[in-house]
Image (spheres, rainbow, N blue to C red):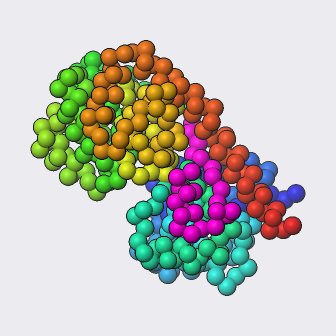
Amino acid sequence: MAAIKLLIVIPTLDQSGAEKQFALLACQLPRDRFEVNVVALTRGGPFEAPLKGAGIPVTILGKRWRGDPGTILKLRRTIREFQPDVILSCLFAANTSVRLATLGMRRPVTMISERCVDTWKSGWQLWLDRRLRKRTDRLIANSQSVAEFYAGVGFPADKISLIPNGVSPAVSSPMTKAEFCEKWNLPENARLIMFVGRLAPQKRLKSLIWAIQILRQADPLAYLLIIGNGPEADELKGYARDVEAISHVRFLGHRQDAGELLTLCDVFWLGSEFEGMSNSLMEAMAAGKPVVVSDIPPNRELVRHGIDGYLVNLGDSTGFSQFTGRLFQDNQLAHRLGTEGAKRMRDEFSVDRMVFRFAELIQQEFADRHS
């Protein structure tokens, strides 16, 4: 049997969660079963190199603005040239572009992937999603929460599949904790709490900054390290100064080695009000770190309260402080929770398992089309 020709379409190859998952997928799908090409609508990025290193052709279309008709035409030409059996797209811009680009042509099997509980979508975006449903063979959600959200806005439940994210084994930082603390002007025995993600309103970072302000009163060695960039960066720095927490907060900006730095922390925090399935949370757990996170459905799919971390009410800064203080005071507890989290990531959320599920689903959709 000839290999299935698979075209993966994604908005960019930036260093973000969805991009990482689909780069891993493209690189690890078995070559005897899949011939993979990747298209990025807007730009390349850090994941372009590993894709090309794995021998996967990458096309950058250079999208200039939202709704750029030239990009749709370029994508249409790419589809005609490659003649894929299956197209797998990820995120709203790519999901929409693929279904528009195939209008009027013999449509390949079309699978879209949604990665978040997209409460941000405006009326016109939800309307367009509805209009394009008939051009969609399968919607793949990365968490039960995402699946339920899209079923709730009218996508047929029998066409929704769940494939959780996969997480790679942790890679230790080449820096020691002492070297890291010296670099960032921290006490050598500092207790490090890390957040990794986009600095955006849905991450509720102000509640985490207030939590470190509470915690440092009881434990002056507690420090919050915020890794990432985003639209709230300047505002958050100002807020940390305003509440007099700035001495115990460090803004590290975007870091290519964020996953490695997680191996240096003592506790991981995530206070988001909505997620799909957080890659940084999974990486922290894979690194054996105890986690304290907001009690929202996607986080509950990863963290079992009191077993491999703690779930805290949304916006409850005192809760973040109290549970983290408990972990700092009980090393055995912190170790047990971290060990359980690492085991769960290894047993239930490996990259191999994620790739296997995608491969089986793509083959099934292809077989159904040609049966």
* Nearer the observer, 283 or 321: 321
Residue 159, relative to residue 75: is it above or below?
A: above
User: Looking at the image, which residue is at 30% across and 24% down?
Assistant: 325
Magenta span contains residue 285: no
User: Looking at the image, which residue is at 47% across and 66% down?
Assistant: 42
Task: Give the quarter of the figure containing the C terminus.
Answer: bottom right
Residue 148, relative to residue 226: is it above or below?
A: below
User: Where are the magenta residues, as a range?
Assistant: 144-168
| Residue 63 on image: x %, y % | 46, 72
| Residue 322 on image: x %, y % | 29, 28
Which quadrant of the structure image shows residue 113? bottom right
| Residue 225 on image: x %, y % | 29, 35
Residue 15, relative to residue 213: is it above or below?
A: below
Residue 162 vs residue 248: left or right? right
Task: Give the quarter of the figure containing the N terminus.
Answer: bottom right
* Nearer the observer, 57 or 204: 204
Magenta span contains residue 166: yes
User: Looking at the image, which residue is at 53% across and 42% down?
Assistant: 301
Residue 217, visible in the rendered structure: yes
| Residue 127 on image: x %, y % | 49, 77
User: Looking at the image, which residue is at 34% across and 45% down?
Assistant: 314
Residue 19 vs residue 355: left or right? left
Residue 60, visible in the rendered structure: no
Residue at the farthest bottom position: 104
Could you tell me how many numbered marks the image carries?
0
Residue 290, relative to residue 228: is it above or below?
A: above
